[in-house]
Image (tube, coloured by chain):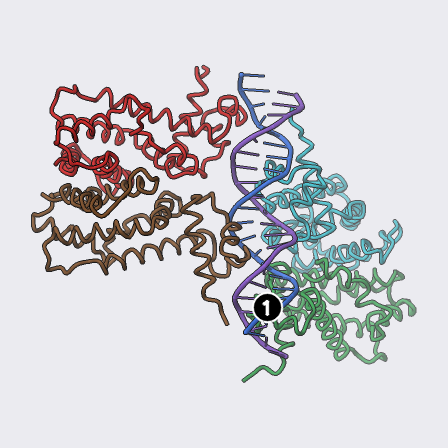
Chain colours: A green, B cyan, C brown, D red, E blue, F purple
Amino acid sequence: MKTPDKRDDIMQATLELIAEHGFHGTSMAMIGERADVGAGTIYRYFKSKENLINAVNQELTEKIIASLLQAGTATGEPLRERFLHLATGLSKYLIDHPIHFRFLEQYYNSPYGVNFRRERLLSKSNNDNIFRDFFEEGVKQKILKDLPLHLLFALAFGPIFAMMRDHILGFIVLNDTLLKKTVEACWDGVKR
Amino acid sequence: MKTPDKRDDIMQATLELIAEHGFHGTSMAMIGERADVGAGTIYRYFKSKENLINAVNQELTEKIIASLLQAGTATGEPLRERFLHLATGLSKYLIDHPIHFRFLEQYYNSPYGVNFRRERLLSKSNNDNIFRDFFEEGVKQKILKDLPLHLLFALAFGPIFAMMRDHILGFIVLNDTLLKKTVEACWDGVKR
Amino acid sequence: MKTPDKRDDIMQATLELIAEHGFHGTSMAMIGERADVGAGTIYRYFKSKENLINAVNQELTEKIIASLLQAGTATGEPLRERFLHLATGLSKYLIDHPIHFRFLEQYYNSPYGVNFRRERLLSKSNNDNIFRDFFEEGVKQKILKDLPLHLLFALAFGPIFAMMRDHILGFIVLNDTLLKKTVEACWDGVKR
Amino acid sequence: MKTPDKRDDIMQATLELIAEHGFHGTSMAMIGERADVGAGTIYRYFKSKENLINAVNQELTEKIIASLLQAGTATGEPLRERFLHLATGLSKYLIDHPIHFRFLEQYYNSPYGVNFRRERLLSKSNNDNIFRDFFEEGVKQKILKDLPLHLLFALAFGPIFAMMRDHILGFIVLNDTLLKKTVEACWDGVKR
DNA sequence: CATGAATGAGACTTCATTCAT
DNA sequence: GATGAATGAAGTCTCATTCAT
């Protein structure tokens, strides 16, 4: 049975391989092999390796946002609850998809990614931006510390990314209790 | 008479280029050119590219630790003061040496670095380990949250690393006030 | 459609160049050029230079053995006749293929070859081993001198290899009469 | 205490290293180190690597000839005795100096050596040539087979060189009895 | 004289990309 | 459309040779 969509196979193979072997450890031949596709075929769907990787990044980002939007709570709830929901949702997503996290780390530390990196999750042009909305409202309500948005973002999610690295390396074993405590600690960091 | 500077020139060139172009974006030829040295000369001082990069990493790590030890405060002081000192010292070092930060990020995301990554700053074998001592004491005194060391570390310094990324990209402009607030917010994250 | 000849072209080019310029005098670029093939193409067929050279050696060895088996005489014949057949066959093959002889000399004097060298023609594991069989039977029948197999081999074929060297250098011009006399002289050396 | 003659040290180091690691496995740096001499110093005594190696070859050849001349027997003796003396002397020399043999094999199979190879031991210009004298006289007296000198040489010494290779590789263990038998077998090969 | 640091040509090998089938 | 054989630029590393000290 043929796979319905070769494009998806290629992207999935790319995601896995780059998460595992890093950027330059992944050759187009490897991707072709894993996706069960001729090396040349990749170029029917993507103009270049850079292009392919950017596409994977984009898709991943969209998936995460979608997941967060779904997990997002009604704007009516107290800000603290909304934060806990958001941060827990993000954490759980990353824990469930460590490969996505590994890929994004590789991506943002590559020459390809550095150009894309600018203003992703906090971008003004991104109307769906849940994070921006959340932080702006929190500052206005004087519930969050009076700091630039980027700093609030760093305080809120920096620990979660750092935690993920240790989790993937096996330095910590996360469970619901531990995760809950950590997310609450993040709240302590941003709340006034 | 030997030119002991040549070794330093090579390491400096490596540091800058890798910070700028990443790991695989930096060729030995580029390093040689920037250091004003024949490509083959590098191999008189370092056995391989990997070796050279490990040496740069080591030197950088030592410099940072030295800087922190110097900035470290007497153990007699209250824990909160010690933390603010430590975190501010680290932040200032990184802000003053953004290239060091960029290099280390590249390093820890490379196949070379991943082996070194394990337990560096928190290593038991590292007797000078200021961070470990600090966190262990804080937990014992019930001043810090009762969490695994790695998580405390993530809460305390995750925001600082995230902040550095945005700072380097120019998304935030840091001054002493802002830095002070951020570091205090980190304390809020870890304190009980 | 695949070009199965390309692999042969590469092996032929390797054979000729190494026979002529020796092992380290032959670069992969030279091989590519002579075979009318991009340098990188060689690596589609052979994992490394060492690999390629081993393959050429193997093929050559097989060809020689095949040629000898074909020239080999019925085991019923007198031992002397069998020897003359064998030695003449080998000599003629080498005279007809001086390049093969040059290559093998290079090969057995290279670090690559030295590992292969052990027990090739006399190997117990080589079931087709005509030489071993011949010598063992000759000793048992008390027709050949009572000496270790390796020494019998040296007595029988040492002169032929030495002759080949002089022949290739043009010091001697061989004809059938001369060859016949030489081979008979070799028999005088091994017979009791 | 300083070594009286650096030139000799360099040649000795070259001899040993090339015998052991082959031609291209021996770098000028290695030679310098083994000879306890700066790499650049070698060039005070020898114009180039090729030059140095040719010098070693020359010296070795002279040593062997000298050794043979010394071991050579009075021309009055029967030819058979003279041959046994000669061949045994050569064999013993090579067995006692396996490194010399290894070097010469490397040398004659290198692009450097191939140019020198022409007419060494049988050279007309070499007045001391014991071998040539011996064979010519033997043919004239109708004691040796009526064959070109090169072929007689191949028959007489080809087995000895082949034997040496196996001896060095450890395939045969030579003792006086075995050597005597082999040398006599060589005589069987050349005598009429 | 002696040194050995410095050099750069050149070796082997990989890989993103192309193109004939 | 799909393929994968072919390519050649570029990367890491070695080493014979030079030259300032």
Which residue is at a point 24% across and 42% down the rendered structure image?
Answer: C158
All told, the count of numbered labels is: 1
Mark 1 closeness class: few <14, some 14–19, many ≥20 residues within 10 Å:
many
**Is residue D131 toward the left or the right of residue D184 in the image?**
right
Q: Is residue D96 above or below residue D21?
A: above
**Is residue B90 toward the left or the right of residue D124 in the image?**
right
Q: Is residue A60 above or below residue B70?
A: below
Q: Who is closer to the viewer here, E11 or A50?
A: E11
**Is residue A10 toward the left or the right of residue C107 in the image?**
right
Which residue is at a point 72% across and 41% down the rendered structure image?
Answer: B34
Q: Quadrant of the C terminus of chain A?
A: bottom right
Q: Is residue A120 above or below residue C164?
A: below
Residue sitting farthest toward the right: A140
- Picture coordinates of residue B73, whole percent (x, y): 76, 42
Q: Quadrant of the N terminus of chain A?
A: bottom right
Question: Of helix, strand and loop, which one carries label 1?
Answer: helix
- Picture coordinates of residue B63, whole percent (x, y): 71, 41
Residue picked out by circle 1: A31
- The quarter of the picture where residue B169 lies is bottom right
In the rendered image, is residue B37 in sight?
yes
Residue sitting farthest toward the left: C142
Residue sitting farthest toward the bottom: A1
Q: Who is closer to the viewer here, C101 or D122?
A: D122
Q: Who is closer to the viewer here, D35 or B146?
A: D35
Q: Is residue B139 above or below residue D69?
A: below
Q: Amino acid at mark 1?
A: Ile
- Picture coordinates of residue C88, whole percent (x, y): 21, 50
In the rendered image, is residue A89 in sight?
no
- Picture coordinates of residue B104, whole percent (x, y): 69, 50
